[in-house]
Image (cartoon, rainbow, N blue to C red):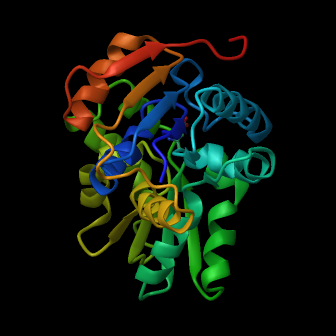
């Protein structure tokens, strides 16, 4: 058993949807969360650049003596998971494998849609990962560039957001999908709008939430879970953007008060 924190990284606030699931499923664990808000979105950036930024985030949290790193970002997972697994001395978990396995286990029609950033879609990591589970499944990937700004700018409520989501998802409407993966950790915030646009018959798979189940299992297997009697866990938040708006959003989504949020600098931007 170990009291060290689990590190979580994302391009911004999206990984907080993973953190929220983690706080429910593994409530004794301490978490250090880092959002690279100043350089968000990662989606349109070249994957090599995302890999470099992800490495910088990992290095920052390694200095804080984390026991495990969760890449709570699909784009960063697509760009950097293997590199981080090869170069860090701690277990590193991405969000794509668990999401793929859950989706492959859910679809009856063997037709899965993937919603993600341009980077995630371009990387082709989801189709490859799903085909490892079952190569007969047809995968339809759709990049949804307008979604992350809606979430980061806190404009995900209301008629305008509803229209943006419905218009963006139109290319998937006639694909007879029964399962769609929320392949970006910002998207669970838009879940009601996505569900409405795709229809009630489509099962949405939250890749981040699925990953938290994997994290819990891994903590047990490696015998590094926190001791349930070890006292109150510690949650710390770091952002490369302004601390105050991050804090307000995090407190609203996580339904917590007085979160410890600090601004930090990474790289040169
Ligand atoms: N939340 C991220 C993901 O899961 C990336 C969003 C972005 O920065 O474009 O892909």
Side (left or right) of 74 relative to 20: right
Q: Nearer the viewer, residue 257 or 202?
A: 257
Q: In this view, does 167 lie to the left or right of 43?
A: left
Q: In this view, does 104 lie above or below 161?
A: below
* Total marks in image: 0
Q: Residue 170 falls in which quadrant of the image? A: bottom left
- Residue occupying the point 31% across, 28% down: 250
* As drawn, 109 above or below 139: below
- Viewer-closest of 51 and 168: 51
The picture places residue 213, in percent across and down from the top left corner, at 42, 64
Q: Quadrant of residue 206?
A: bottom left
Residue 74 percent across, percent down from the top left: 57, 49
Q: Residue at x 34, y 54 (%)?
A: 26
- Check the picture and name the quadrant holding the C terminus: top right
* Residue displayed at 19% across by 35% down: 255
Q: Position of residue 186 (x, y in %)?
A: 42, 42
144 shown above or below 237: below
Q: In this view, does 106 lie to the left or right of 258?
A: right
Give the x, y percent position of residue 117. 56, 45
Q: Taking the image as drawn, is residue 60 in sight?
A: yes
Q: Is residue 210 above or below residue 226?
A: below
Which residue shows up at 50% across the image and 46% down it? Answer: 144
Whether residue 166 appears in this view of the structure is: no
């Amino acid at each position: 058993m170990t009291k060290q924190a689990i590190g979580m990284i994302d391009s911004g606030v999206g990984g907080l949807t993973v953190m929220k699931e983690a706080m429910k499923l593994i409530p004794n664990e301490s978490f250090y969360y880092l959002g690279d808000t100043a350089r968000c979105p990662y989606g349109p950036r070249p994957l090599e650049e995302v890999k470099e930024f992800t490495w910088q985030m990992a290095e920052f949290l390694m200095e804080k003596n984390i026991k495990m790193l969760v890449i709570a970002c699909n784009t960063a997972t697509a760009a950097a998971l293997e590199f981080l697994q090869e170069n860090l001395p701690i277990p590193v978990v991405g969000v794509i494998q668990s999401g793929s396995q859950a989706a492959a286990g859910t679809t009856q029609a063997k037709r899965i849609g993937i919603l993600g950033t341009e980077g995630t879609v371009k990387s082709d990591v989801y189709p490859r990962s799903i085909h490892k589970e079952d190569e007969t499944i047809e995968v339809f990937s759709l990049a949804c560039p307008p979604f992350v700004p809606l979430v980061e700018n806190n404009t995900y409520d209301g008629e305008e957001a509803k229209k943006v989501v419905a218009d963006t998802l139109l290319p998937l409407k006639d694909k007879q999908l029964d399962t769609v993966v929320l392949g970006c950790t910002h998207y669970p915030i838009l879940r009601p709008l996505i569900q409405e646009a795709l229809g009630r018959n489509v099962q949405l798979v939250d890749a981040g939430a699925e990953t938290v189940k994997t994290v819990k299992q891994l903590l047990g297997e490696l015998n590094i879970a926190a001791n349930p009697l070890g006292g109150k866990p510690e949650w710390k938040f770091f952002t490369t953007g302004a601390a105050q708006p991050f804090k307000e959003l995090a407190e609203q989504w996580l339904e917590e008060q007085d979160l410890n949020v600090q601004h930090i600098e990474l790289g040169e931007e």
